[in-house]
């Protein structure tokens, strides 16, 4: 479960279910047993989006990005999280029935050793945490040195992308200028795509969305 590095090759351009050719931008399924992504076409993605399809091994990754403007992470919160390079993401693993947090790094992504209670204390009250869908969505937290802490709900494939980018660009302890610029671009896109949480974003009815107790 510590592995979070498997990512489809960028030049892989066929649906892994039906072999249909894929555009560069395409949908993904999460293989909950192997904890890996599968690239897929719109039709195959749709098959796993239907109600009742959510309990199986493969789960469709949604495309919503949410922000909660009323939620901030202050210095005390941030210190509690002990995030080494200013970013982390976490999701609910339905197989393990618990929350897992990862710190992306040049070597892939390392599972946080932090007590899940701490995550819960800092982020558990956020409305984004309440609507997080297990396995397929993640909460991405990020802070530039000296800046405010931010938190977005994102599709989990975006976190794989982030890990891939860091493996590609990161150098030395702080990543270097190129990696920092690349990360800034990445978070700019996340902010652009995110819309504020609203009442329609209720917890998923597939047994997820709530925090492990
Ligand atoms: Zn397909
Ligand atoms: Zn893909």
Image: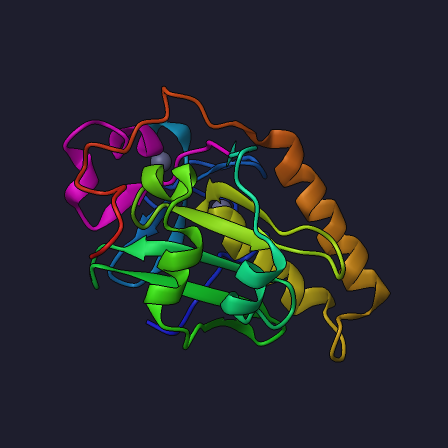
Q: Please, which residue is most extreme toward the top here?
A: 200
**Residue 211 seen:** yes
Q: Residue at x 60, y 54 (%)?
A: 74
* x and y, in percent, of residue 131 in the image: 34, 37
Quadrant showing the C terminus: bottom left
> Quadrant of the rendered structure where residue 18 is?
top left
Task: State which region is magenta.
Answer: 44-65
**Residue 36, image quadrant:** bottom left
| Residue 163 on image: x %, y % | 57, 62
| 71 sits to left or right of 182 | left
User: In the rendering, at what x and y percent does residue 77 appear?
Assistant: 53, 59
Q: Is residue 58 magenta?
A: yes
Seen at 62% across and 60% down, the residue is 75
> Which residue ends up furthest to the front in the rendered image?
76
In front: 52, or 201? 201
Task: Report the side of 130 relative to 10 (left or right).
Answer: left
Q: Quadrant of residue 79?
A: bottom right
Q: How is the protein colored in the picture?
A: rainbow
Above or below, comparing residue 31 to residue 109 in the picture: above
Which is more toward the observer, 109 or 75? Answer: 75
Please state which of residues 91 and 169 is positioned toward the viewer in this rendering.
Answer: 91
Determine whether, in the image, residue 100 is placed left or right of residue 88: left
Instruction: Determine if residue 18 is in view.
Output: no
Direction from residue 115 to residue 169 in the image, left or right? right
Say if the magenta span includes residue 37. Answer: no
């Amino acid at each position: 479960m510590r592995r979070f590095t498997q990512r489809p090759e960028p030049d892989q351009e066929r649906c892994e279910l039906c072999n249909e050719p894929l555009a560069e931008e395409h949908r993904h399924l999460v293989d909950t047993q192997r904890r890996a992504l599968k690239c897929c076409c719109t039709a195959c993605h749709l098959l796993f989006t239907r109600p009742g399809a959510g309990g199986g091994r493969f789960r469709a990754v949604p495309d919503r990005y949410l922000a909660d403007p009323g939620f901030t992470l202050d210095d005390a919160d941030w210190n509690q999280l002990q995030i080494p390079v200013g970013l982390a993401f976490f999701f609910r693993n339905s197989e393990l029935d618990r929350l897992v947090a990862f710190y992306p790094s040049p070597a892939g992504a390392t599972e946080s050793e932090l007590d899940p209670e701490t995550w819960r204390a800092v982020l558990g009250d956020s409305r984004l945490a309440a609507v997080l869908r297990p396995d397929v969505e993640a909460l991405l937290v990020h802070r530039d040195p000296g800046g405010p802490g931010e938190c977005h709900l994102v599709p989990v494939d975006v976190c794989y992308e982030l890990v891939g980018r860091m493996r590609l660009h990161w150098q030395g302890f702080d990543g270097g200028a190129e990696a920092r610029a690349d990360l800034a671009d990445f978070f700019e896109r996340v902010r652009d795509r995110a819309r504020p949480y609203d009442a329609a974003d209720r917890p998923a009815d597939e047994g997820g969305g709530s925090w492990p107790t």
